[in-house]
Every structure is written in structure tokens, then in C-alpha cells.
Image (cartoon, helix red, strand yellow):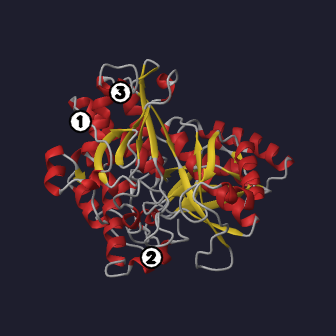
Amino acid sequence: MFGDRMRGDPAERAARAGDLARKLREDGVHGIVLPYVDTAGVTRIKTVPTARLAHAARWGVGMSPVFDVFLTDDSITSGGQLGGPDGDLRLVPDLDRLTVLAAQPGWAWAPVDRYSQAGDPWPACQRGFARAMTRQAAEAGLTFKTAIEVEWALGRAGTDEFVPACTGPAYGATRLIELSDYARDLLAALDAQGVAVEQFHPEYADAQFEVSVAATDPVAAADDSLLVRHTIRAVAHRHGLRASFSPSVLAGRVGNGGHVHLSAARDGRNLFSGGPGPHGLTAEAQAAAAGILELLPALLAIGAPSVASYLRLVPSHWAGAYACWGHETREAALRLVTGDAGEQESAANLEVKCFDLAANPYLLFGALIAAALDGVRRGLLLPPPVTGDPARFSADELAERGIRRMPAGLDEAARALSVARPLRDALGDMLTDAVLAVRAAEAQRFRGVSDEDVAAALRWVY
């Protein structure tokens, strides 16, 4: 079970929410979006009128636990512990993250934690899981910071086909010129919502863009990822466009990644710089990275959770298709980013390239921290780094270097998770059961389906 009983005094939460609601109503906000991400990676919501925010903060909003085993087509599977019409949960908004939505006038947004009707933390609450793993790290003296790079493709509205919203070459100025008003409105909305954008640029694939935001604590970083995507969609809609975060918008083309950046500190010192190890790694940073590297095949079932994920995860596409690490090596699943001379102490971090935006970010951050902590506890060592493209090696050469090809399908990744004891122990029985049940059902749903039909079916889900 993750965390304590419902956080804070209910009466105090309600009083604070009442004060916030009065201010929101004065500012013309009429409704609050309460989002959470299901096990399949789909963001689900409930909403309440602003006048009901205090009630929601005190008592929560009802939601069936069956949503933990929803699939991407809104059908429902079941596992050993979840499934069926019985039971109820309470969605409790986090008032610290209450945000007025700049691209949706009259609306605000607040992510939720899930509790039982008795006020106990729900064992399958992914946000609670991320918080629990962050707390475990703090108890070990480690502070993690994380961020997700958000990539998306912009299409024209009015069709389920993908019609690129702009032309021009990869990373080209033409795209920004054609969509200048959209890009301006997006940056303005993110700024108004307090999101610290570090970079925004056109990406490689057709009408693809990327935004990078500042790293922060894992729960807040997952919240930021949800809010950024919500805002991208809302601004796109106002401009007659559709945003797709799917790992494979068009089969056979470069898809959308969700690269994770992760760093760890002890006593305020970044462990990924200033150490005696390769490229300035400290012993603890090496062990944390080695823990992640060892469990990468199993982590794919969490960070690349869609059948479409494996249309993206192919060699020689900078997708991280090989379980190895390298210094600034974009084909390695783990890329050590050391930063420029003079800023390594603050900039050095580990980029995990094999994940995408079908992942539940809370589940992903919690699992990454669990893997890193396992590596630190066991004092793991990193193998030698890789340079260049691992695809150039033969199978024997890969084996000699200890480089593994990542799972090529969702079934294979789920099997790796099913036997990954450090991750199963961290997730707990109910959350593990939900993840494996949903992955098995998604894999079965698309068995024998062509790549083109997989991409089309999931194009606008994520």
C-alpha cells in the first residue's frame, strides 16, 4: 500500500478549497478537470463545478476501480485482483497543483490521488506509487529529479487520417513559420500555467514538434507531463488541429518518444558529475544507472506499454533499441548527458530513450526509481560504454559486449516484468496484476493486426 490515509485534515482541505473556489469563480472559472492516467496510459477525467471543489477536496469524487483494467479501446479486462462492476474509489484533488487552464477559458485543472471509501490509499494508485518511491529514495538520502521530453505530431482536424499540419524539413524553420501562431499560443499558455519550458522546436517526423520542461521532483514532473499534453491538445483544438502523442502515428515512420531525464543528488550534490568514474560518474550514480540498465527489458512493459511502442522501437532510429549505455550516444537506451564545460554539476543527467508517451508517467517514474534504488543497494557496476550504433555489431559481437536487443514486442516485455522481482516488489501485488493483465489483453487485441492498422487504431488515443 502506498502512503498514509487521506493526506491532511479533511476539514482543513475543504476550507482551503472553499477559499480557492471563491477566487476561481471571481476569475470566471466554472469547472475543475480532475485527471488521472489509467494502466494503459490513457488520461481519464472527471470534472466538478467550481462550487463543488470544497466537497471534492474533503470527500473525493467517485470512480470505479475497474478503470485500472481499462484498455485503449475502452473495453475492460480483468486480473487476479481487479475487474468487474463492484466497489468504488475516491478521487481527491491535489490543491497544491490546482491550475487555471490558459487554453480552456472557464476551466481549471488538478491531478488526483485515489483512495478507498474508508480513506485508505488505493494500492493501485500510480500517483501514490510515484510518491512512495520518491519517499523511499529520500529515506536512503537520495533526491531524484525527473522530466519527460514531450513529442507530438500535429494533424489537420476533421479526419482520422493523419494529414500533416505543416510542411518543411526535419527541424526546419519552415514548420515554425507556418505554425507560428499555434506555437506562440502554446508557449504563452504554458507560461501562464507556470510550466518552465526550456526548449521548443520542430522534430524529425512529419509535422512533429518537441517541448522540454525543467526537471523537478518525480510526482510534480509527472503532473507537468500531463498538464503539458493537456495544453498542447487544447491549443491545437483552438487552431483547428489535432495532436497525436502516439508512439507510431504512421507505421514505418519515426514515431513520438517520451525520453526521460533523471538525476540523483545526495546532500544537494548531483551524483552524475564530479565523481571518479567514467565521465565524472560517482559510484552511486553508476550503481543507479546499472540498476536501470539491468531491468530495462522489464521496464519496457511500463515505459513502452503499447503495441504501437514496438513500431517505434527499432534500431538505427535513435529510439534506444539496445540495452546499453553511452556518453552522448543517441542510439543507446541510456544516454549519459554531461552538459557543457562549466555546467556539468547542474546539468549532468541520465536520459532513458526507449520510452514513449503511451506510458503512465507516475508508474514510469516510480519504477525507474525502484530500479535505481535496487542498483544502489546492490552496488552494481556499469559495463563499458558503447559508441556509435550497436546495430553494426553481429549477434556474437553484441553478446561479447554484453549488449542486449530490447524486447521486440509487448508480450516479451511483459514476460520480463513478470519475473523482475525488484519491480514486482516495489509495485505490489495489485498494481503488478493490473499492469500484466492490461498488457496481455492489449497484446491479444492486436495479435495478427498489420502495423498500419495498429498505428491507425491508436493514432488519436494517446
Q: What is the total number of numbered labels drawn onto the structure image?
A: 3
Position of residue 33 measured from the top left corner of the image (x, y, whole percent) = 66, 56
Front residue of 133 and 115: 133
Near-viewer residue (231 or 123): 231
State which tag comes first along the sequence, 2 or 1.
2
SS class, disc 2: loop
Residue type marked 2: Ser
Up-down relation of residue 141 to residue 313 (above or below) = above
Residue identified by numbered label 3 = 279
- Residue type at numbered disc 1: Pro
Q: Is residue 409 visible?
A: yes
Q: Nearer the viewer, residue 341 or 447?
A: 341
Amino acid type, mark 3: His
Circle 1 packing at 10 Å, graded few (<14), some (14-19), many (20+), is: few
Q: Sequence-wise, which precedes: disc 3 or disc 2?
A: 2
Read off the residue under disc 2.
75
Q: Which mark is residue 384?
A: 1
* Mark-to-mark CA distance, 2 and 1: 45 Å
Q: What x and y, as percent, mark residue 147?
A: 51, 42
User: In front: mark 3 or mark 2?
Assistant: 3
Q: Residue at x 50, y 60 (%)?
A: 256
